[in-house]
Amino acid sequence: MNKKKTEMNHLNVKTALVVIFIFSLGLYSGAIFFTEVDAETIQMITQPPIEKEVLYLDSPNSLTINLPAVNGNDTGVTAFLEVDVKSGSGLILVNVGNIITNFDTQASMRSAAEIASDYLNKSLEEVDITYNLVADASMLEGPSAGAAFTIATVLALTGSDINDTVMITGTINHDGSIGPAGRIKEKAIASKEIGTELFLVPVGEAYEYNETEFCSDYGIFKNYCQPELVPVKIEDLAEIKVVEVSDLGEALEYFRA
């Protein structure tokens, strides 16, 4: 009886170890997967490019802003955001149609409304804001459109027209300062392709760095090489004028029609 008990205990221990190993392997695999997901990537689907004419918000306080992004093939693409402001009770509504959005995209829209309210010193209690996101994509994620969301919200709240020859990439902070974004070159190229004349980027991101090697002789060491990073202007690579902006007020000056 004791022998059977001992064998059963050994079996239970082995089973528990196998379960723990499988569970740990699953956690590790999941961590790798989510680490490798690009937080600024649009996963494209096969469908015709979205045209602005299909956008549906048409109240006097509606406007559309172009959004630069990057698809799963590391190619720049363009999405559109409509912002509509109507009399209401302080609702912030998000319509993403058939797009799957990550929580940070929707959080960026909520932040955009709050930051725009603070910037204008205007209460949102008597208006409803609707964000309509349209993209040639099945998935949109990432906070790097935060600055664009906020600019569009400010202009819609004030009934202003937008200069659609300008595009911007960058996150937005609670104080209105513009934070970093990724894939600047790809986004700049996409902006150029739809006729944009000016591309705004966060401070310090008007350049990308190409890695090269510098080789020389050091005493007995012949042809000793070490890597160097050489700055290259994004506007030269994308053939579009690129300007760095530090905050919401500075960016708005370029977007006012």
Image: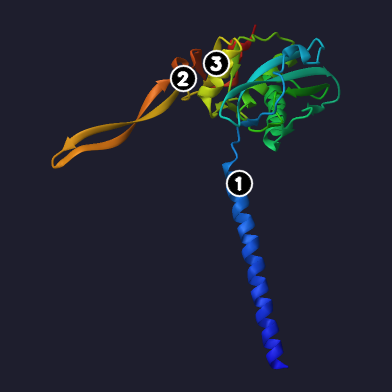
Residue at image point 59% right, 55% down: 28
Q: Amino acid at mark 3?
A: Phe
Between disc 3 and disc 1, whose residue precedes? 1
Residue 233 versus residue 19 in the image, above or below: above
Residue 200 visible in this rendered orientation of the protein: yes
Q: Which residue is mark 1?
A: 33
Residue 169 in the image, given as x and y percentages of width and height: 58, 23
Where's residue 251, x and y in %? 58, 16
Foreground: 95 or 46? 46
Disc 2 + disc 3, Cβ < 8 Å: yes
Mark 2: amino acid: Ile
Q: Does the image show residue 158?
A: no
Q: Amino acid at mark 1?
A: Phe
Q: Quadrant of the C terminus?
A: top right
Which label sits in the foreground, 2 or 1? 1
- Give the residue at the far top of this rendering: 257
Out of 31 and 256, give the one closest to the viewer.
31
Q: Secondary structure at mark 1?
A: helix
Q: Is residue 109 above or below residue 159?
A: below
Percent of width and height locating residue 210:
39, 28
> Which class describes the residues within 10 Å of circle 3: few (<14), some (14-19), or many (20+)?
many
Q: Which mark is residue 199?
A: 3
Q: Earlier in the sequence, mark 2 or mark 1?
A: 1
Residue 208 lies in quadrant: top left
Picture quarter with the N terminus: bottom right
Q: Is residue 227 above or below residue 131?
A: below
Horizontal side of residue 104 vs 240, given as left or right: right
Splitting the image into 4 quarters, where does residue 46 fall? top right
The circle drawn on residue 234 is 2
Which residue in the rendered view is the most extreme toward the left? 219
Mark sitting earlier along the chain (2/3): 3
